[in-house]
Image: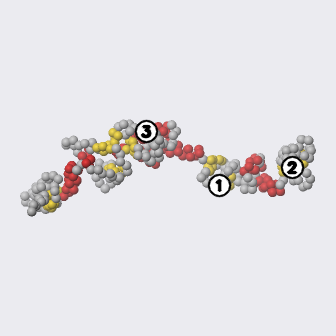
Amino acid sequence: MATQSVNAVIVDLPGDVNDDGDNSDCFIFSSTPLSTRGSTKRDAISVENYDRDRKLQRLWVYPPHNRSIKSESPIYIDLDLYDDEDDDIRILCFPPPIHTKSLEKGQSSASAMVTFDCEICVETKSIIESFRIGGCSHFYCNDCVSKYIAAKLQDNILSIECPVSGCSGRLEPDQCRYILPREVFDRWGDALCEAVVMRSKRFYCPYKDCSALLFMDESEVMKDSECPHCHRMVCVECGTKWHPEMTCEEFQKLAENERGRDDILLATMAKKKKWKRCPSCKFYIEKSHGCLYMKCRCGLAFCYNCGTPSRDHSHYCYNCKR
């Protein structure tokens, strides 16, 4: 019966050194080696480097481009030059069009940098300089995105979309904060706040001893509100003093000197008793009996029903036909 030969890989374990200068502790793996290293005790692979060397050798024998792998895992990029527990990393949750620089003989693997091509400046940049736009798959270098936003703000465009025409991607201040200069970010924030204020319905407190600037929350339906400065009630719909006993239209018909509390109470009582006001002197008149022809103490004759002045002092109103 034929026997299958099994190759051994010798891994050096940390321990004492014997008299011959060799480490006396070792471990033998019965596996097929990918290189000649570890074939003898003098060429043993240290236990610290075995796993790393094994992976590198597998990549050499089975390179990534020969394997069909579709990975949806995020890409972690170390931003520090040294390996420690406090490493700063950046996570890319998208597959960018990247390429790596090939290693030349004698070149360190640390010098091989993952890069991509920015479609705005058409330059090859490091992947850590990439910025992905929210809502789409387009990404560019940080410097180009920063300049793009600054140019839009210069043109008073606050809702900044992806540079690709027709794309649904949108740039948001919070997303772009870490790549923008401080003055650009502050200008963007101030402009957005000012735009919100300009779109809001605003009016001044109608009380002369207050006159504070008030803003109405258009997301809520309200008729009255309390001024946060003088704590008096105001009508939100017409921006005047609160008038619970009459509509805004009726209140607007009142003269400025008739909008006091007593005047409003008198107007409310006149409405309940169906009193009419003289079109000339504005004095309240009550009809006790008779026809609709009414003559005020100021001398003006008018129709009690519609208030139309009578030209010929007749008892017939040509306006309401009564």
Of residues 193 and 279, the one drawn nearer to the viewer in this rendering: 279
Horizontally, residue 20 falls left or right of residue 179, namely left
Q: Residue at x 21, y 52 (%)?
A: 58
**Whether residue 16 can be seen here:** no
* Res 147 label: 3
Front tag of 1 and 2? 2
> Is residue 289 rendered to the left or right of residue 116?
right
Q: Residues within 10 Å of mark 2 (few under 14, many from 20)?
A: many
The amino acid type, in three-letter code, at marker 2 is Tyr
- The percent position of residue 68, horizontal first and vertical second, equals 29, 50
Residue at left 87%, top 53%?
A: 286
Across and down, in percent, residue 229 comes to: 63, 53
Looking at the image, tell me whether mark 3 or mark 1 is earlier in sequence order.
Answer: 3
- The residue that label 1 is drawn on is 222
Say the numbered circle drawn on residue 304: 2
Mark 3 or 2: in front is 2
Q: Position of residue 255 (x, y in %)?
A: 77, 47
> Hey, which quadrant is residue 28 in on the image?
bottom left
For the residue labelled by badge 2, is the local secondary structure a helix, a strand or a loop? Answer: loop
| Residue drawn at 47 percent across, 41 percent down | 166
Residue 47 appears in the rendering: yes
Circle 3 sits in a helix, a strand or a loop, which is it? helix
The residue sitting at the left extreme is 20
User: Is residue 103 found left or right of 77 in the rendered image?
Assistant: left
Q: Quadrant of the N terminus?
A: bottom left
User: Can you say whether 51 is above or below 156 in the image?
Assistant: below
